Amino acid sequence: MLEGFQSVGKTIQEIVTKRYTKGANIVQEDLCCPVSYDAQYLKIIPREVIEKDYGCGDPSQYIKEGETVLDLGSGTGKICFIAAQVVGPKGKVIGIDSTDKMLEVARRNTPIVAKKLGYENVFFKRGLIQDLMTDLDYMDHLLTEKPVTSAAEHMDFINNQNNYKYKKPLIPSNSIDIIVSNCVLNLVDDRQKNSLFHEIFRVLKPNGRIAISDIISDKVSPLHLKKDETLWGGCISGALQEQEFLQILKDIGFQDIILEKREEKPWKIIENIEYRSVTVLAWKRDLDKTQIVSGSATYKGPFQVVEDDRGNQYQRGVAKNITLDTISILKSSPYEHLFHMDIRANQNRESAQKKSNPRQKLTTQNKCC
Ligand SMILES: C[S@@+](CC[C@H](N)C(=O)[O-])C[C@H]1O[C@@H](n2cnc3c(N)ncnc32)[C@H](O)[C@@H]1O
């Protein structure tokens, strides 16, 4: 796929930067599908930000108060400014984008939104979403201080870059409650999509989750479409095939993956390939390996049997013994309405014990009289 671009001397990143620099300067009508956001959150967002909306869904709906949110490919900042209101003053929102012009619009509007809110909790950072370790603003600073003019200096720079990114990663590991993204993942070079998903998984806290709206295709896009600059920049030919997208998430280690929204009508049909918007939710679970039974869950139905991403099968109406971790998963989103729970009397005490001393072995014996 990339050979086509390289032969004309362009990389995917250059194509994307050119396209979205234009999109930050003047509203582009053809970039991504129209989306309606919750009007209550749009009131305080400057018009320029709302007009330069290049999303294809609304992942902000899945954010909760007090959370730390990361928006991949934040553009002019609309989802971040919505998230700022949802998480409130105790939460924090980080937007990452690689296009200077997009960041310029987002950063210019940050104090305007903060003033209206009465607090500032949104921060925009320059980086590539497939490398959430490297702070591109800092790389610029390094290069300004010491420009690279020889291979030896280049090696020196790489060394400094590596030292810095491990000492001070742009986004530290296990630091984010929820990652949102609106029509961006498809724009990443296919060869870097694997590292993109690894990075997403790395920065999420245990039990953190993703809410990603993106364009997917029903069939794999052929090479000649992938070589088309306009189609790539327009969120078409870099789109992952639907099942491939879900499988990548599973392979990376995500669980409880949900195809939350799937537009019935394709956004575009090109050469009989349907490109449509979807929103996917998935969790990075942190499961205790102790496997001590702490209660049971009875699946309500309507299916006769269901199986989760951990391989647990639940038959309708049949109580299944479950561990403490599974209890906490099934009691909360997205499972909270699907099961009747029977939690053992000692479960709460065990939970408290576990919190105060996580290494302490749990016991199933109820020592209370
Ligand atoms: C289709 S626009 C979506 C913008 C925004 N999410 C919205 O809803 O309006 C894609 C955005 O992703 C950014 N982008 C594309 N590839 C990127 C990458 N590899 N790393 C960081 N940002 C990227 C572009 O600069 C642009 O701002």
Image (tube, grey):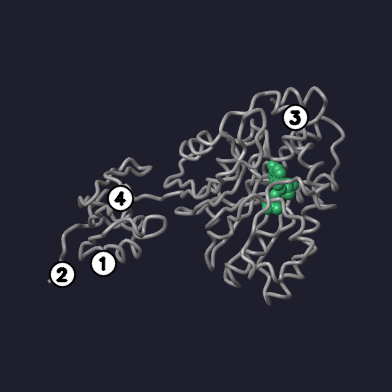
Q: Contact, CB < 8 Å: mark 3 with mark 4?
A: no
Q: Contact, CB < 8 Å: mark 1 with mark 2?
A: yes
Q: Could you tell me which residue is drawn at 22 percent across and 50 percent down?
A: 320
Q: Amino acid at mark 3?
A: Asp
The CA span between labels 1 and 2 is: 10 Å
Q: Of helix, strand and loop, which one carries label 4? A: loop
The residue wearing badge 3 is: 228
Q: Position of residue 234 (x, y in %)?
A: 73, 40
Q: Amino acid at mark 2?
A: Cys
Q: Of helix, strand and loop, which one carries label 2? A: loop
Label 1 or label 4, whichever lies nearer to me, is: 4
Give 277 or 196, whichever is nearer the viewer: 277
The residue wearing badge 4 is: 302
Give 239 or 198, whichever is nearer the viewer: 239
**Mark 2 surroundings within 10 Å by alpha-carbon count, few (fewer than 14), some (14 through 19), many (20 or more):** few
Label 2 or label 4, whichever lies nearer to me, is: 4
The residue wearing badge 2 is: 368
Which mark sits nearer the N-terminus, 2 or 4? Answer: 4
Q: Which mark is residue 349?
A: 1
Label 3 or label 1, whichever lies nearer to me, is: 3
**Quadrant location, the C terminus:** bottom left
